[in-house]
Amino acid sequence: MSLAESTPSRRNGLAQNVLHKLGAGVGVLLLSTACGRTITAATCVGTQERCVAQELARGGSVLGTSIDSILYASIEDRLASPTAESSVKMASPGTFDGSAGDHAGDMVEDAWHYLEFQTRLGPRNPGSTGHRELVDFLVSELVKSADDVQVQPFEVAHEGAKYSMTNVSALFKASDGRERPFILLGAHFDTRPRAECDPVPELRSSPILGANDGASGVAVLLEIARMLAYRRPPVPVMLAFFDGEDFGASTDWMFLGSRRYAETTNPSDVMCVLLLDMIGDEDLDIYVERYSLLSSPDLVDTVWSAAERLGHGQTFHRELGLYILDDHIPFIERGIPSIDIIDFDYPYWHTTLDTADKCSPHSLRIVRDVVLEVILRGEFAGPSLHKPEGF
C-alpha cells in the first residue's frame, strides 16, 4: 500500500488445547502438537480426507508441525468423496449463534500458524523462491476447503526483466448453494522487494520479510477458509490473494494483482470487498480509511458495528485515519463497494524489521472475529457505492 501521508505490546501464546465436537454431527480430528497448539487435521468430508487423517495419526505432520498425540477423533462419511482439486465438496455447516466464541477459532490451523509459516519461507517478492513456494502452498491449502479454487497467472515486464505473478482465489458457496454475488475478502501475499525505509542505509535494497505487511492478512484469510469449510456462510464468500501489491517503486507499479482481478471480474458478481492489510501489529489500532468511507460508508458502518458488538471498539476506531492507496482502489474504480481494514501506524513498514516478533496472535484473532461476525451473522446487505471524485 502507499500513503497519500504516515506503534507496538506483544501478546504471545498459542491456542489452548480444547476438545470440542462441532455441531450438526460433523466429525473432526483434533491433534495435540508438541508445542501445545491444537489443530484440525481433517474435517471428515469423505474417503480422501479420512486417508489424510489416518496418515497424520500415524505420525505425519501438518506444515512441518510434528504430531504428538491424538486428542479426539470422530470420522464420518457424511458426503461423497471430493471431486477434482478445484472443486472440493465440504461437510454441512452448523448453525451460527452470533457469538465470537462460536467461531471456534482454536479448532483449525490458526492465523498465527500461517503467519509464522509464511515468514519461514523468507521474502516472498515476485521472482523469489519464497514467492513461488507460497503460490504453490496457497493453492494446495485452499483446495482442502474451498468449493472452487482459481489461479490467475499474469506476466509483468519491468526494468528489463519479466516477472511471473499469480492471483489465487477460492470460492465458498452459501449455505443454500448460491455462488453469486459474493463478498470478496482480499489480501496481498507478495512482499516488498526493497526495504527503502530501513534505518540502516546498507539494507535498503534488501527484500523485506513482511510478517505484518503481507503475511498477516493472508494468515487470517487462510484461517477463515478452514472455518468456512465446516460452517457454511449465509452468503457466498470469495477469498482473493493478490500478487504484486508491493512490487514497484511508484504506485504505477503497485496493486498489480488487484488491478488484474478487478478488470476481469463482473462488478455484478461482487457484493462488496473487505481488504485486510497490515492487521497483525501487536498494538492494533484500526481507523477508518478515508477512501473507504468516501466510497462505502454503509459498509464501513457494518464492519465497525460488528467490531463494537464483539467488544472491539477500542481496536476499530470510528475516527478517521488516512487516505491510503491499496488493493481496494481498483474495485472502487469498478464501482464495487470496497473498504480497507488496515493499521498503517506501523514503524517497521518497508523495513527489514517487519518480522513476526512485531506481530500478535491476539490482533489476528480480533480481525478474524470481526470479519466472521459480518459474514456469518447473516444480517449483511449489499451497501451502495458513493464514488469519490476522481475515481
Image (cartoon, rainbow, N blue to C red):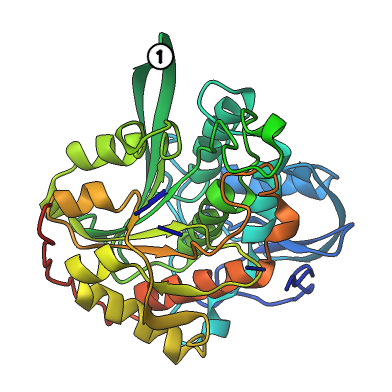
Establish if 337 lies above or below 94.
above
Looking at the image, residue 334 sits to the left or right of residue 244; the answer is: left
Query: Is residue 97 in sight in this rendering?
Result: no
Residue at image coords 11%, 62%: 387
Report x, y in % for residue 336: 17, 57
Residue at image coords 65%, 73%: 362
Residue at image coords 41%, 34%: 244
Residue at image coords 43%, 91%: 309
Regarding mark 1 in the picture, which secondary structure is present there?
loop
Establish if 245 lies above or below 332.
above
Which quarter of the picture shows residue 357? bottom right
Query: Is residue 152 in sight in this rendering?
Result: yes
Establish if 205 lies above or below 352.
above
Between 85 and 62, the one nearer to me in the picture: 62
Badge 1: residue crowd in 10 Å (few <14, some 14–19, many ≥20): few
The residue to which callout 1 is attached is 159
Establish if 193 lies above or below 221.
above
Report x, y in % for residue 140: 54, 37
Q: How many marks?
A: 1
Which quarter of the picture shows residue 8? bottom right
Between 16 and 279, the one nearer to me in the picture: 279
Label 1 sits on what residue type? Glu
Between 52 and 360, the one nearer to me in the picture: 360
Report x, y in % for residue 305: 36, 86
Report x, y in % for residue 143: 48, 42
